[in-house]
Image (cartoon, helix red, strand yellow):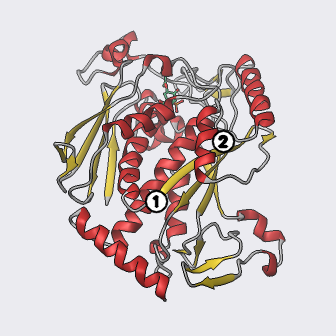
Amino acid sequence: MRYITAGESHGPQLTAIIEGVPSNVPFSFDEINKQLERRQKGHGRGRRMQIEKDTAKIVSGVRHGFTTGAPITLVVENNDWTHWQKIMGAEPIPEEDEARRRVSRPRPGHADLNGAIKYHQRDMRNILERSSARETTMRVAVGAVARILLEQFGIRVAGRVKQIGEVIARDRELSLSELIEITEASPVRCVDPIAEKKMMELIDKAKEDGDSLGGIVEVVVEGVPTGLGSHVQWDRKLDSRLAQAIVSIQAFKGVEIGIGFEAAGLPGSQVHDEIVWNKESGYSRTTNRAGGLEGGMTTGMPIVVRGVMKPIPTLYKPLMSVDIDTKEAFTAQIERSDSCAVPAASVVAEAVVAWEIACAMCEKFPSDALEDMIANVKDYRAYTESF
Ligand code: EPS
């Protein structure tokens, strides 16, 4: 499977085209819209999220509630477009027209300056409109399609916020269903009520100070068969694909799988997971420090991936920058933004992980129709248990 997205933050719409989804997958509009709504929430979001009510239109590849095997096109309209038609219109307007809302003072930490130099743009709006995290709307919509496919095989994806700024959440042993229930009820998608309160206070303080905050999110996937991905080639290793997917999310700077960076300070005996076998379910591990991945392949244990998001670079009290017209020192441009989008980013992380797992499933069980794929997965699962 593959997909691409298109669309600007304040353009008329966002679009995604997905290719390779098998036919006859029962398609749920509610599931896509539920995921889009989850992304819009979270303490620390800006005013834009009150303007938008992200809902997906499906304009190809689905008929009478089922995929046909043809490319699926998803569209989310930007409500804010009504205020931006002149600023973002496709028609030519004079260079000096105020309506361009031209941007000449790049924000440190954003794509503005590098993009402007690379694409020969004297108006950095032509860069920031596309580099904006508004694009994650389509990642979540695409991820929702992946989740619908994964559900057919009992594979479930959940996420949580582990850290915002300096506040680190305490870990709790939870089932996936409990994790989902608690995080859905939390304004910061956190399972530790004490940390949740502190995170919200910290976000309020950052907002008051015109500052922004980053954090750490974690995604868990349960129900994956053993042997997705491969050890034989660098770009077929599932952990490497997950790492790319996570770091491709706007403002993400790092990724960990399982115990991650902690492994550097521990001896092998405390890093690797012992292998056990029983008659009912076959092979398993006594622990899951590897985060469900060994040798670029799934072990059958839950996949655990974390990503670190830097604080959003748009600051209401901006850092110093340079005006590209005069080369004089100036504070960076202020664009409307969020003070903290880590809770929303955890939903995006779930989506990109779901997509990679769905792709790995389609590679392991290539099928044109869902019926074939279900039969293939069933046979393989029976084989794995008897191995
Ligand atoms: C948005 C993410 C952020 C928001 C954006 C909507 O994007 P950026 O990466 O550009 O900061 O600020 O909203 C606006 C650009 C706006 O006009 O408020 C999102 O996740 O939908």
**Which secondary structure, mark 1?**
loop
Q: Which residue is mark 2?
A: 310
Tell me: residue 98, above or below residue 360: above
Residue at the spot 24% in from the left edge and 70% down from the top edge: 372
Q: Using the numbered discs, state the Cα–Cα distance from disc 2 to disc 1 in whole angstroms.
A: 30 Å
Let me know if residue 319 appears in the view: yes
Q: Which mark is residue 378?
A: none
Residue at the spot 42% in from the left edge and 44% down from the top edge: 139
x and y percent of residue 286 in the render? 70, 75
* Outermost residue, bottom side: 387
Q: Quadrant of the N terminus?
A: bottom left
**Which secondary structure, mark 2?**
loop
- Of labels 2 and 1, earlier in sequence is 1
* Outermost residue, front side: 280
Q: How many marks?
A: 2
Let me know if residue 95 appears in the view: no
Residue at the spot 47% in from the left edge and 51% down from the top edge: 352
Residue at the spot 56% in from the left edge and 22% down from the top edge: 326
Image position of 87 (left or right of 386): left
Tell me: residue 30, above or below residue 201: below
Residue type (three-letter) at the residue carrying disc 1:
Ile
Q: Nearer the viewer, residue 159 or 176?
A: 176
Residue count near mark 1 (Cα–Cα under 10 Å), binned few <14, some 14–19, many ≥20:
some
Label 2 or label 1, whichever lies nearer to me, is: 1
x and y percent of residue 370 in the render? 25, 62
Tell me: residue 277, above or below residue 11: below
Image position of 275 (left or right of 35): right
Q: Which residue is mark 1?
A: 155
Q: Quadrant of residue 282?
A: bottom right
